[in-house]
Image: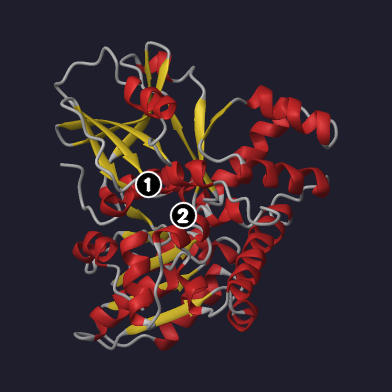
Amino acid sequence: MIKREKYISRIRGFYESDLIKIITGIRRCGKTVLLEQIMEEIRAKSANIIYLNFEDLAVRSAIKSPLQLIDYVEQNRKEGKCYLFFDEIQNMENWLDACKSLRLHNNSLFITGSNSKLLSSEFTSELSGRYVAFRIKPFVYRELHEYAEELGKEVTVTDYLIWGGFPKRIEFDTLTDQKTYLNDLVNTIVINDLINRYKIRKTDLFTNFVRYILRTNSRIFSARSIHKYINDNYGACSINTILKYISFLEEAYIIESIRQYSNKVKKELTYYQKLYNEDVSLNSIMVMGNRYDLTYNMENIVYNELLFMGYDLRVYDNAGKVIDFIAKKGNKTYFVQVALTVAEEKTYNREFGAFAGLDNLNQKIVISNDEIDYSTSTVRHIALKDFLQMNDLG
């Protein structure tokens, strides 16, 4: 497995700290492998390491309470600082109590989880100033390409546009096997992690809601419009239920939302949001046949890649013309439009025309899957294949 230095470099400075290192992200995005890579680095200077995976039934059966976990650590640690690695810790009841105690006794504690409840208000209030959190995501294209080469395989840009960056899926040789893996992953996330955790009674309604949300990535979110669609097609539910269901998907890192940009914070909070899938495969696996949603998947891909580069993203309303992203990092701001192709005149005029009226203080960019350079004197065009190799928009 490739070394995910982008993430490890952010965590490395905390190896010796008594702060709890929390590594979160959607299931199967590579959190366990990242823990193993951190352990490998620490093992070069210390053998005082304890690793427990709370997805393992044997571990959950043997260690059911904070006191049992604390006792296990005390029985198995060596003298000096001990490095503790607890994978999917949220599967143990009252895990927070164990963490609060263990960090006080010369331990360096690393925990992972696939649920944002790890960062709930209860957690942050009880451990304010005593933890650092790191969000891990599925592979971006450069990582996927590097891992494919390690396996002696090839992954194309089109493959990435459809099937995304879950690391394990490219270990399978056939598309049929990859789709089986992704289907099982979705079923695990939706059924095991959400329906069971939140004791959802209208399981058919919720499953259809999830399918609808995952198929409509990169669109403007309106709770009212989603509510109308679900009521018209799948049965009665309230807007509050829709909002609750969306929060469940966000808590499991299945979707993310970004707001429309405004200079006035209070006004920004009133705007609609855009929803993005954590990985575009969550859209494609829902498609019957091969009519994949490349247009919206491409915008979703650019969103994920820009986040990986470190940009803060918002939707931008330019006098009624929606610009996909206003991307900010440090003192640099970019306006970014995404289109599958701008070869046709109508699409070209729409995408490049979205910047009309903006000054030239900030760079304006169109990203498309075209290989011809459509740059103008005021708008920079970047081919998707080139964008996917960039570390920065500058």
Decide if residue 123 is on the left or right side of residue 45: right
Q: Which residue is pictured at 27% across the width and 86% down the height?
A: 79
Instruction: Tell us which disc is closer to us: 1 or 2.
Output: 1
Residue 63: % across, % down = 58, 77
Q: Point out residue 376 in the picture as x, y percentages from the top left corner.
A: 20, 29
Residue occupying image coordinates x 66% and y 36%: 244
Using the image as rendered, state which of residue 107 and residue 218 is in the foreground: 218
Q: Secondary structure at mark 2?
A: helix
Please give the residue where the numbered disc 2 appears in the rendered image: 161
Position of residue 196 relative to residue 66, above or below, is: above
The residue at which mark 1 appears reads as 369
| Cβ atoms under marks 1 and 2 closer than 8 Å | yes
Q: Secondary structure at mark 1?
A: loop
Please report the residue visible at 36 percent of the width from the left and 71 percent of the height from the top.
34
Coloring scheme used: secondary structure
Q: Quadrant of residue 372?
A: top left
Q: Which is more N-terminal, label 2 or label 1?
A: 2
From this viewpoint, which residue is outermost toward the right?
235
Is residue 322 placed above or below 117 in the rendered structure? Answer: above
